[in-house]
Image (cartoon, grey):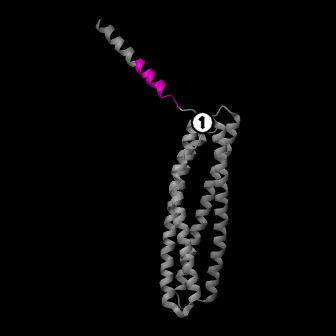
Amino acid sequence: MLFKGKSRYLISILAILFILSGCGAKKSPVEKMYDVLENVVSKEKAFEEQQDPLVSLEKKEKEIYDQIIELGMKEYDQIVKLSDEAITLTDKRKNYMEKETQSLKESKQEFKKAADLKDQFDDPKLTKIANELYDIMMQRFQAHDELYKEYSDALKYDKELYMMFKNKNLPLEDLEVQVNKLNETYKKVYDANEKFNRLTEQYNEKKMLFYQKAGLKSNK
């Protein structure tokens, strides 16, 4: 009787485990893909939070630059003061850019999970959209890498320029060379930013198409 009682107890445990496993059924590839895409939005929240402060700092620095140009070397003390303020703003801009980049790195790590999911769908059309979505997003990450490089160069050249303004005996030719270098670099920054924004739009459009085709709805 003792052995028989234990058997009944074992069977009861197995039955409970079977029921629980049924309640916690594995998610489908579509549901897993949805989780990844929504988590990416959360990862990039910090990226979004850097945008307005960064633009604000850029405007302030531009105002200081214009003031320096208007003053001329006769107001040397004021130029030094303004240059130091501009250098401080440049450092702050770098910090925001680093936070922005870190956010995208975390986003990329999350999004890479989609690589194992994008070919698991039963619907060939959904698979096609998922693969296009993946390719666009990876291009977007690469575009931001390019933007980060160019923007970092621009920040470096900005600081060099403000240090040059603090030199009383600065040759005009050296200043012209530095300004031209900055203009060329900011042109690259602009182009890289345009590419990144374009790919961001394409990604969002493709993601919405994926959601529509899969019968999903974005929560974020």
Residue 160 placed where, x, y %? 55, 78
For disc 1, the marked residue is 30
Q: Which SS does the magenta portion mostly show?
A: helix
Disc 1 residue crowd, few under 14, some 14–19, many 20+, Cα 10 Å: many
**Measuring 38% from the left and 16% from the top, which residue is drawn there?**
12
Vertical arrangement, residue 140 with respect to residue 23, above or below: below
Look at the numbered disc 1 and give the secondary structure of its residue: helix
Q: Quick check: is 173 in the magenta stretch?
A: no
Residue 101 showing in the rendered view:
no
Comparing 171 with 59, the one in front is: 59
Residue 42 placed where, x, y %? 51, 49
Residue type of the residue flagged with mark 1: Val
**Measuring 52% from the left and 46% from the top, which residue is drawn there?**
39
Q: Residue furthest bottom?
A: 74
User: Relative to 180, is 92 on the left or the right?
Assistant: left
Q: Quick check: is 21 in the magenta stretch?
A: yes
**Measuring 64% from the left and 45% from the top, which residue is drawn there?**
208
User: Relative to 167, is 177 on the left or the right?
Assistant: right
Vertical arrangement, residue 32 with respect to residue 150, above or below: above
Residue 79 placed where, x, y %? 51, 86
Vertical arrangement, residue 7 with respect to residue 184, above or below: above
Comparing 75 with 157, the one in front is: 75
Residue 121 placed where, x, y %? 64, 34
User: Relative to 176, is 108 on the left or the right?
Assistant: left
Work out which quarter of the rendered image holds the N terminus and state it: top left
Residue numbers of the magenta segment:
14-26
Residue 113 showing in the rendered view:
yes
